[in-house]
Amino acid sequence: MRSRRPLTTIAALMVVLASAGCAQTAPPAASADRPASGQDFPLTVDNCGEQVVFDAAPQSVILLESAPVTILDGLGVLDRVVARAGSFPDGYYAADLAARIDGIEVLSDDIDTSGHLTMSSEVVLAREPDLALGLPEGMTREALRDGGVNTLIHPVYCESGVGDTTFDTLYELVLTYGSIFDESARAQDLVDDLEARVAAVENDTADAAPRTAAVLYPSVGGGPLYAYGRASMAHPQLEAAGFDNAFADASERVFEVSIEELISRDPDALILLYQGDEEGVLEEVAGLPGADALRAVERGDVLLQLFNFTEPPTPLSVTGLERIVERFGPGS
């Protein structure tokens, strides 16, 4: 099982406990051995190079992407979400959780073919939250901050990124959110459970025969084909499932790829990510010129996977890992 790391090891989302005033002494930093509690506020988070200050644990949250749902639920704070925007397919969640999400006010569920949400800051500010999770196109962190709303962006979406993504990226993010929401004990329990599930899969795939896979995002209806490299959660997910990432030589998180390049790498399996409806996703790839030469297409070794089962790192990524192994087997 992976060793525990302190919160400060994640560069893009690092918790630093700040003093309440310039003349005061800052309290000691939170750690896995000393969970954060109420007296540790104010809390300063370094998020994508921005210093985000929390005077107290957030009580009114707007979700501007679906990825944080399972972290918030695992921390027991999903009831603090007052509104949401984007795509939240029931396929991600157990029935009880899906019902609770359905009960949250919807600001917008309109996303484009590349999975992006566009909306204005005014729509968020009108709800008077104290925290927005996610930053859609058409919205700026500055506008939200000027309106009294803190914003956190998932670290893998930062322009600087986090380098090569690993499951530790996920564990550290959960622990960081645990400090922000003053639920460090629950965060540690969630990390322990996730680590155990990943370790169980890795044990099953330890003796896997060599095989390759590519994780792609097709634009249904025409448009670019995207592939995922080492900075994405797809990379450690494939490794844990017993695959070599066909695009492991790419340091980027996601990038446009040609069908010719995909054919030249000819992975044993394809995992096609999508948001919304899966209709047309497989056909989009299979219909590309020369795609019938791909052995994964020829053999039907293709898995359609809702986007958050892989990207970005969240507890759903562990469920997605289990789904990959269930679909393709341990490869031994």
Image (spheres, grey):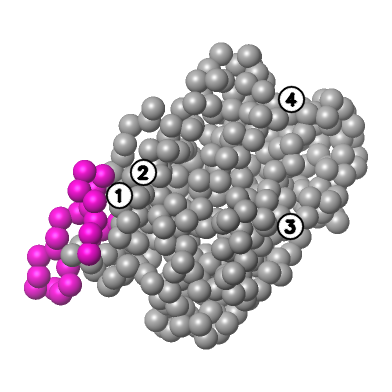
Q: Amino acid at mark 3?
A: Gly
Q: Nearer the viewer, mark 2 or mark 3?
A: 2
Image point 38% across, 30% down: which residue? 2
Q: Is residue 24 above or below residue 302?
A: below
Residue ID for mark 3:
276
Q: Is residue 6 visible to us here? A: yes
Question: Residue 185, which numbered label?
Answer: 1
Q: Secondary structure at mark 3?
A: loop
Q: Nearer the viewer, mark 1 or mark 3?
A: 1
Mark 4: give few (<14), some (14-19) or many (20+) Cα within 10 Å.
Answer: many
Magenta-tinted stretch: 14-38
Q: CA distance from mark 3 to mark 4?
A: 26 Å
Residue 22 falls inside the magenta stretch: yes
Mark 3: give few (<14), some (14-19) or many (20+) Cα within 10 Å.
Answer: some
Q: CA distance from mark 2 to mark 4?
A: 36 Å
Image point 68% across, 39% down: which residue? 215
Residue ID for mark 2:
189
- Which mark sits nearer the N-terminus, 4 or 1? 1
Please state which of residues 75 and 293 is positioned toward the viewer in this rendering: 75
x then y, percent, for residue 159: 50, 57
Q: Nearer the viewer, mark 4 or mark 1?
A: 1
Q: CA distance from mark 1 to mark 3?
A: 34 Å
Q: Amino acid at mark 2?
A: Asp
Q: Is residue 177 above or below residue 151?
A: above
